[in-house]
Image (spheres, rainbow, N blue to C red):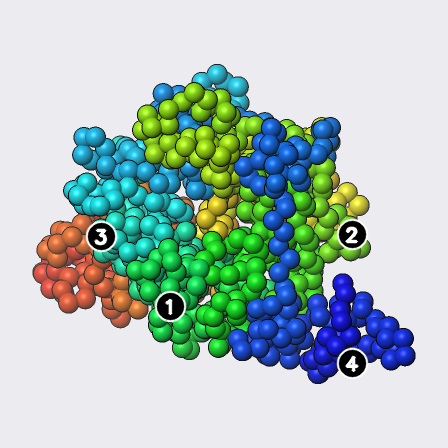
């Protein structure tokens, strides 16, 4: 790098004044004017505490001190446009933007030692090919926005499939709204070849919105993006939540058209889960995110109350409407309320241990563009009707510069989120004050302006979480061992920054996984150009930060079918040769046809998402990759002969619903293992999310899989729950099973002192306890002998006086009518208003009724009912409160 002498002297002055805590020696020979450029580069690449403070002020953004520190509007861009573009095919290697593609350079295929992947798409769709291969379904070439979501809907142990199908009309020819999204159970292939197939149950998604709202609107289509299937309301049944885009952020006549969809789960007569609701339910629950350009919904529990809160990742609009992602706090009654202390336009985010205290309770956000998506703050010639950036927009965005990292944490005394990262101010909307590679008008994540994806794991071997940020052109690693405890990761302080190889036409998603169950983490990057991946490994015992890109694994068929770019999309020349594009009804295909015939290529092409899930329950993570305009592909993980016998262990977390959410989001799992010589190794995983990832490009297995190689054996597992409480389980005596059978770890850290059983002496002297059997829902309560802890209920009296179940954490004791002989049931706590009191004589009474809980004669399976305690000759049962005993976890 070359500098003029005048600039160097200026840089020396600025950088020397910035290094208040570090003595800087930079040699300048005044006679020969030889300057130590290496030291200059080191200083410019560093970022002191003083620099961080200096660069928070947007008025200083042009200073060289900010080039690698905080927000800079000069000099920090390193984005190259000469990489492999997503649309490049073998026949187009001589076109600009294709020269670096591996299929244009490497003619010999190299073999990756990590393993290979086999395409199993045909088997997946073999159950009903007529359905799956019809237009606007996943077997047909399609404009995919992200890969599908996986969740076990029918509790058979296999992960089932959901795809909302980005961008299509939602009203059917018969006028209803049903069947337009894909929901399917995973079943064994009819050929008995060990593979899986999908069986559609799309009819279980029931929209209750008025079809006329779609038909009569100026735009009768939907723009679905990220999805979530989990228990949002705590009734033990899965719910469905889907975000929507917002017509590019332009004004429309009916803004409700692009509200989010919320469908609550219920059981039909056959006991199957059915999803019922729509946009109207989302509005009723306060989660419709009107005017937002939704990308995905991040599920988390920010305040530690055990309920699922929501943050919608959203892009900024083209007009001046301010509609960022906002934190939505779960009220426990199927509604959410906004917490405006956390509002951001995020391109990716994660829950992690950012301050190094061992507890994953910080939220890290990579900020996307904030100012409206127009080319100038003045009048954009393409959008004259939208005017200039108004004062409200400028005021909101002056503290949220693109590319910076915001870190939030719940403040319990203030009862809100607080930004604990450096605050920015005076960020200008002027065009010349934007980073030169990030001018107004770009799409989020393009040209390395903000991180497109984030992943966390222990990457430096210190048993604390680290973070890796993926940009369009690079990976930045933030190692906890580089920082003192309590110090946050800041821009310019990454411990390692790696440029993506030239064959990768842009980083789309990053995942940290153990690809072959070797016991070592691998890093996988999905590139935008089809068939291209970047793999990184580090098995260096002495240098834990020695992460290296495995160039032999990235592309050109090096890992089997997954690196075969020809599988990503149809051959455009064969598809459109001698075709009249005007005759094509499917509008996306018609547009691509016209573009290809005019230009000989199409920009609407590339990989758009990746899901890492174990499709066949063999303990190895398989990959599902989506493309636009292209195919959805399923790839089975095929290990090398060396790794074929590697072992694994699988866990699932179950929070207590009081201080930890039922999915354990925000927990940290540390597995201790030992090898044949007795050497100990610890492997850490953060449960940063459930199903979804840090962005809208894909999903992950909700089971926690640890690879063990051939020689590691687990000895214990430690859970650090979001409450910071620790729980340890011994694994001595564990035996490997090739089938995936998760060990369920329940959070008992807060419950032993607050839960109790209610029992009495039966007529034969037996201790009798309350039970609901194995069922949930509006289930009758009865008594059983107090022998089987798995059947009899434990309760706690919450602040509302409700008797809340431990086994079914969202269910409370209720009674339908308050008349004599009314049966007691378990009902969902959000729908229960009954409160109870235990008298000094040990009667359990219903507040405000004068009635108590009793049984007929105390025999096995006798139901509980309510009776007036003042009636003569009526036996009202006395109940002994017995503290709950839990399994001892050592």
Pointer 2: what residue?
A: 541
281, above or below 170, in the image: below
Q: In the shown orientation, is residue 724 left or right of residue 871?
A: right
Residue drawn at (58%, 51%), measured in percent from left and top? Answer: 472
499, above or below 773, in the image: below
Whether residue 543 is visible to the viewer of this picture, yes or no, is: yes
Residue drawn at (77%, 65%), measured in percent from left and top? Answer: 2
252 and 680: which is toward the camera: 252
Pointer 3: what residue?
A: 254
Residue drawn at (69%, 62%), measured in percent from left and top? Answer: 495
Pointer 4: what residue?
A: 23
Whole-angstrom CA distance, mark 3 to mark 4, is 62 Å
Q: Point out the tag, 3 or 2, that comes first from the N-terminus.
A: 3
Closer to the eye: label 1 or 3: 1
- Residue 389, label in figure: 1
Q: In the shown orientation, is residue 467 left or right of residue 385?
A: right
Q: Under tag 4, what secondary structure?
A: loop
50 and 86: which is toward the camera: 86
């Amino acid at each position: 790098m070359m500098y003029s002498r005048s600039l160097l002297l200026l840089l020396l002055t600025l950088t020397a004044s910035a290094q208040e805590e570090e003595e800087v020696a930079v040699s300048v020979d005044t006679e020969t004017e030889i300057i130590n450029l290496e030291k200059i580069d080191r200083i410019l690449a560093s970022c002191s505490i003083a620099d961080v403070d200096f660069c928070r002020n947007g008025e200083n953004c042009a200073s060289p001190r900010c080039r690698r520190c905080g927000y800079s509007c000069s000099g920090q861009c390193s984005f190259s446009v000469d990489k492999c573009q997503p649309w490049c095919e073998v026949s187009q290697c001589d076109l600009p933007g294709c020269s670096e593609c591996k299929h244009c350079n490497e003619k010999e295929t190299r073999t990756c030692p990590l393993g290979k992947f086999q395409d199993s798409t045909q088997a997946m769709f073999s159950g009903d090919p007529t359905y799956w291969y019809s237009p606007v379904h996943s077997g047909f070439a399609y404009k995919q926005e992200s890969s599908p979501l996986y969740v076990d809907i029918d509790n058979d142990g296999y992960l089932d499939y959901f795809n909302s199908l980005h961008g299509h009309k939602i009203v059917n020819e018969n006028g209803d709204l049903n069947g337009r999204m894909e929901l399917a159970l995973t079943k064994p292939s009819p050929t008995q070849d060990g593979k899986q197939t999908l069986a559609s149950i799309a009819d279980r998604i029931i929209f209750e919105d008025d079809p006329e709202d779609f038909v009569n609107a100026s735009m009768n289509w939907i723009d679905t993006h990220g999805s979530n299937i989990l228990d949002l309301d705590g009734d033990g049944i899965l719910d469905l939540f889907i975000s929507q885009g917002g017509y590019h952020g332009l004004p429309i006549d009916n803004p409700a058209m692009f509200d989010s969809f919320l469908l609550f789960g219920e059981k039909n007569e056959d006991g199957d889960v059915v999803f019922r609701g729509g946009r109207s339910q989302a509005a009723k629950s306060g989660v419709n995110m009107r005017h937002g350009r939704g990308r995905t919904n991040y599920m988390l529990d920010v305040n530690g109350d055990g309920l699922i809160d929501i943050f919608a990742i959203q892009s900024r609009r083209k007009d001046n409407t301010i509609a960022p992602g906002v934190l939505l706090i779960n009220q426990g009654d199927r509604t959410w309320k906004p917490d405006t202390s956390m509002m951001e336009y995020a391109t990716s985010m994660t829950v992690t241990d950012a301050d190094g205290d061992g507890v994953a309770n910080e939220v890290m956000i990579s900020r996307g563009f904030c100012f409206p998506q127009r080319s100038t703050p003045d009048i954009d010639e393409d959008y004259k009707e939208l005017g200039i950036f108004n004062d409200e927009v400028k005021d909101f965005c002056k503290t949220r510069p693109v590319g910076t990292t915001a870190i939030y944490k719940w403040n319990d005394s203030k009862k809100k989120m607080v930004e604990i990262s450096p605050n920015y101010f005076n960020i200008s909307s002027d065009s010349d004050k934007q980073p030169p590679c990030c001018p107004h008008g770009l799409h989020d994540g393009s040209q390395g302006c903000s991180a497109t994806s984030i992943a966390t794991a222990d990457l430096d071997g210190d048993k604390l979480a680290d973070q890796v940020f993926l940009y369009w052109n690079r990976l930045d690693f933030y190692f906890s061992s580089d920082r003192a405890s309590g110090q946050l990761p800041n821009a310019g302080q990454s411990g390692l920054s790696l440029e993506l190889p030239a064959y990768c036409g842009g980083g789309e998603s990053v995942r940290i996984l153990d690809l072959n169950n070797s016991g070592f983490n691998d890093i996988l990057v999905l590139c935008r150009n089809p068939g291209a991946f970047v793999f990184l490994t580090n098995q260096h015992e002495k240098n834990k930060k020695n992460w290296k890109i495995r160039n032999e694994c990235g592309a050109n068929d090096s890992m089997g079918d997954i690196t075969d770019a020809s599988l990503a999309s149809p051959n455009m020349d064969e598809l459109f040769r001698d075709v009249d594009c005007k005759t094509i009804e499917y509008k996306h295909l018609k547009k691509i046809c016209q573009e290809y015939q005019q230009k000989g290529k199409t920009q609407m092409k590339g990989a758009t998402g990746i899901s890492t899930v174990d499709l066949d329950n063999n303990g190895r993570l398989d990959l599902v990759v989506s493309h636009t305009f292209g195919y959805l592909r399923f790839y089975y993980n095929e290990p090398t002969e060396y790794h074929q016998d590697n072992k694994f262990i699988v866990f699932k977390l179950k929070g207590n619903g009081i201080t930890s959410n039922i999915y354990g989001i925000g927990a940290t799992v540390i597995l201790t293992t030992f090898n044949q010589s007795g050497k100990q190794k610890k492997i850490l995983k953060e449960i940063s999310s459930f199903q979804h990832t840090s962005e809208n490009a894909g999903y992950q297995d909700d089971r926690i899989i640890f690879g063990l190689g051939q020689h590691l054996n687990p000895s214990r597992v430690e859970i650090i729950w979001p409450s910071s409480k620790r729980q340890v389980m011994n694994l001595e005596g564990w035996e490997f099973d090739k089938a995936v059978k998760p060990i369920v770890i329940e959070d008992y850290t807060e419950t032993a002192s607050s839960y109790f059983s209610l029992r009495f002496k039966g007529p034969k002297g037996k201790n009798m306890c309350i039970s609901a059997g194995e069922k949930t829902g509006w289930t009758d309560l009865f008594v059983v002998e107090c022998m089987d802890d798995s059947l009899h209920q434990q309760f706690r009296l919450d602040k509302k006086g409700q008797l809340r179940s431990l086994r079914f954490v969202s269910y409370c004791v209720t009674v339908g009518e308050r008349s004599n002989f009314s049966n007691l049931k378990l009902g969902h706590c959000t729908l229960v208003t009954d409160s109870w009191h235990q008298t000094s004589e040990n009667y359990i009474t219903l507040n405000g009724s004068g009635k108590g809980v009793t049984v007929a004669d105390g025999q096995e399976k006798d139901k509980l009912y309510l009776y007036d305690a003042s009636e003569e000759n009526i036996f009202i049962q006395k109940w002994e409160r017995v503290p709950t005993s839990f399994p001892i976890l050592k």
